[in-house]
Image (cartoon, grey):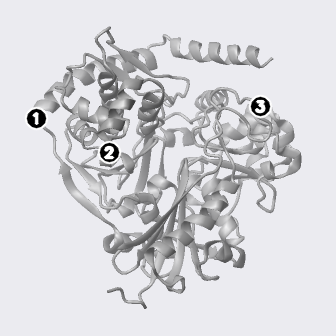
Amino acid sequence: MQDESEALVVGVDFGTLSGRAIVVRVRDGAELGTGTHAYEHGVLDRVLPTTGAPLPPDWALQVPQDYIDALRTAVPAAIADAGVDPARVIGIGTDFTACTMVPTTDEGTPLCALPAFADAPHAYAKLWRHHAAQPQADRINELARRRGEKWLRRYGGLISSEWEFAKALHMLEEAPDVYAAMDRWVEAADWIVWQLTGQYVRNACSAGYKGIHQQGGYPAEDFLAELNPAFADFVATKLDQPIGALGDKAGTLSAEAAAWTGLPEGIAVSVGNVDAHVTAPAAGAVEPGQMVAIMGTSTCHVMSSDELREVPGMCGVVDGGIVPGLWGYEAGQSGVGDIFAWYVDNQVPPAYHERARERGLSVHELLTDLASAQAVGEHGLVALDWHSGNRSVLVDHELSGLVVGQTLSTRAEDVYRALLEATAFGTRVIVDAFTTAGVPVTELIIAGGLMRNPLLMQIYADVLNLPLSVIGSRQGPALGSALHAAVAAGAYEDIRAAAAAMGSVDRAVYRPDPRGVEAYDLLFAEYSALHDHFGRGGTNVMHRLRAMRRIASDRKDK
């Protein structure tokens, strides 16, 4: 029996395709109800919804109204599913995909919601996997290296095209009218909190990892001016904002947001956060050496350490970026579940789809079943997991996917397994980079939807030669947001205390098989050779193919 007086919190995870809300009991982290809302517009990567005009390659946009609709739908659904009185809710926390950027007016209205800019692609939210700003990122990196900017080392020596500065510079240079009309360049993680509270507070996580905010400041004005004179005042006029610490209260729930969600007006709203980083406390990963891999459409790897090190290709290191008192590190892979979904949707023959229907399985389940019967290396393939570019450690979104070893005997399940293995190899490159740099990984904890694939998990355990722990929640980011809501509401002193009481993890669920470890060491050597040849060898063939694609697309549009 539930104690009808016990306090509750709500966590909302805004993912790539949907928003998910959970109702959590503050005392012990019990998840009492869930609700989900699929975004009406999803990801805009082909055409603009207002005109049907084609979008260029490497674009990925979203409609911010979809995020508000998620609050209107998912939160009431979670309360109804829990069967609880919403008056018991004392706080709400949210998380978002990092570096999803929303251009807004001073009042927070997205520019795409204004009639004057409804047909302007740059006026829409740029999703994390919008990679069209790679040329701008290259220029930022080149200039920072030439000037010896100290902050560059905090990002493994490379700034990503996914991040705030590259995307903003891209807008300035392609759509100066949109850039001029934009008053605020806002991380979606902060925009949604702004809508909930009426107050705009930057969160320390996004600012530090994606906003190049290090040691109390952003890149200098003269640096920005050297990139483009019109970019000199970008920080001062469009980006700079008070920064809130993780777990702090950003404000209280407004009357309007209370009407959307059905929650009590005036409850605590925690400072925004990033989906990956907020998951670490939910998985009990608050100590050095515990790396969390949040595996979904992409994978983000986060961990804390008491040592400050320069890790090549990391996405950033931020003081208190995950938990107070420790350095928070981030790395990641731009495509994981997205790669598996692309393969099933576009490459698997119809006979497999029919066979899956006959067996009452999804195509993913069928291919996993078939691939599970193979010995390591039996398919004779090795793949590169760069179908959405490389986030770590090469930080190059002009790279692309590759499968080597295909013959006329190659079957769908062979390629599927090779793609599963490629993502595990990509994670091993990241783990090896951290370990070599003096930030050893002692435990890997898996969160996200892909943890439900046992073949994939065993492959990771064998490739990494590490035991894999698994978060005890299927809604890791939402649970993490709920933990932060509890802290913001004053139920716990800090996020460590909340993690101890409300977090959930099953330790060492998957253990390395010595035979698999030995076999995968040989296959990983081949992956590494391809990785360095195409990523570091100066061949640039993947870059040239991307350039040809853009030229052909431009000609077709004209």
Question: Callout 1, which amino acid?
Answer: Pro
**On the image, numbered disc 3 is attached to which residue?**
53
Cα separation, mark 1 vs mark 2, equals 25 Å
Q: At which x and y percent is residue 441?
A: 28, 46
From the image, which quarter does the C terminus lie in? top right
Q: Quadrant of residue 331?
A: top left
Q: At which x and y percent is residue 291?
A: 33, 50
Q: Are marks 3 and 2 in contact (CB under 8 Å)?
A: no
Residue located 56% across and 36% down the image: 159
**On the image, numbered disc 1 is attached to which residue?**
514
Q: At which x and y percent is residue 536?
A: 44, 18
Q: Which mark is residue 488?
A: none
Judge left or right: residue 298 versus residue 554. left
Which of the two labelled residues, at mark 3 and mark 2, occupies the earlier sequence position?
3
Which of the two labelled residues, at mark 3 and mark 1, occupies the earlier sequence position?
3
From the image, which quarter does the N terminus lie in? bottom left
Q: Which mark is residue 439?
A: 2
